[in-house]
Amino acid sequence: MLYIASSAGLLLPSTLTNRVANSSNKSSVPRSILWSKKDTKEATDKEEINLDEDNSSNNKPCFWKPKGPRSWWVERVKLENLEIGQELSGHVVQYNLEAKTGPKLYFECGIGRTDKNGDWSIVNGMLRLDKGKPSVARKRAARFRQKDQVQLFVSRVQKGCGRLEVCAKIEQVQKYDEEPKISVTTLKKSQEVVGKVVKLYPYGAIIDIGANVRGLLHITKVARLLDQYVSKEEGLKKAGFEKGAKVRLIVESVEKRRLSLDFTDDVKEDARKEKEQKQQLIDESNDSQKRDELDAWKEYGNQKYQDDNNLNDGTDDAINDGNEYNKGYNDEYDEEYEDDYDDRYDEEMDIESSLGLDMY
């Protein structure tokens, strides 16, 4: 093994000397073999800082080629340099028409981002299609896929996760710009929010409160507030939760990015008072109805009693008249019967008379 004299007066192997020389080339600070561990760590940190600066300063540009004839390679735009409303052009590279949050198209529009290591990654712009019939979504997606260049506008940029949303109309950009979305994780329990009904389902109403996640007002809360049965979507509409209606609610809970909403305390209190007033009116109506019924029954009883008395008086007169009539009739009948009895033919008496026995 070949030994070489070092600057410190020591004989070192040639491999170790080369390693020290290579490490000294990477750093502007001269390094000695007799440095302590602390000095070595400081030098290593300085080398890493220099390497990061070199990588950031020597980032190579990334290019892409738009679809279509006579297209040239164009340098990609960094995601962090985009502005809301900026015009782009691209073509469809992927689509998902059966996503839970609605049909989507993904466009290659010349956007990219660099990671901490300075490596490029492609960022596709996501275009949301309106929720509707699947056949309509398929037709719209087919029209976009047939075009080599589609005019797009930047509607939302999420630099942290590297997401890009685009839209086909500038009016939609203004809508997103006027209504910036807040993170659902920033919402607190019992926080009051104002939202708009965007969709009705058999289990409740979907409310947009301006967050990146829409909230759910369950149908049981509506039924409990109204103190009556609510029949799915039709019942929600009758309760005033038609699409587009504005509502004032509070945050009940946020679990796993699921936002649950409920009515405010003052709304519940107003509903309770209204329920008590209705119940009071019902009770008063029932009491009034009962009093009217009692008065009617009382009047009916008095009238019935008077009619019965009149009927009894007439019956007594009729009975007396009948008795007198029967008495006279019976007297006349008795007299006639006695006369008839005297004139009757008595066969036994006739026989006795013929035998001479009637004299005894």
Image (tube, rainbow, N blue to C red):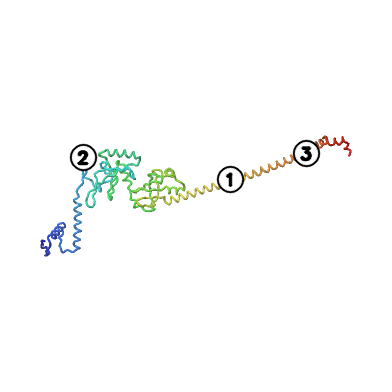
Q: Which residue is mark 2?
A: 71
Quadrant location, the C terminus: top right
Residue at the outermost front position: 355
Locate residue 58, reporting x and y percent. 18, 51
Q: Which badge, 1 or 3, is on the more N-terminal residue?
A: 1
Quadrant location, the N terminus: bottom left
Q: Give the alpha-carbon distance from disc 2 to disc 1, as whole Å.
A: 93 Å
> How many marks can you see?
3
Locate residue 118, reporting x and y percent. 22, 51
Instruction: Report crowding for label 2: few under 14, some 14 to 19, many 20 or more residues within 10 A (C-alpha).
Output: few
Q: Which residue is mark 3?
A: 330
Instruction: Report crowding for label 1: few under 14, some 14 to 19, many 20 or more residues within 10 A (C-alpha).
Output: few
- Describe the element under mark 1 as helix, strand or loop: helix
Location of residue 234 by image quarter: top left
Q: Which residue is mark 1?
A: 293
Q: Which badge, 3 or 2, is on the more N-terminal residue?
A: 2
285 to the left or right of 121: right
- Describe the element under mark 3 as helix, strand or loop: helix
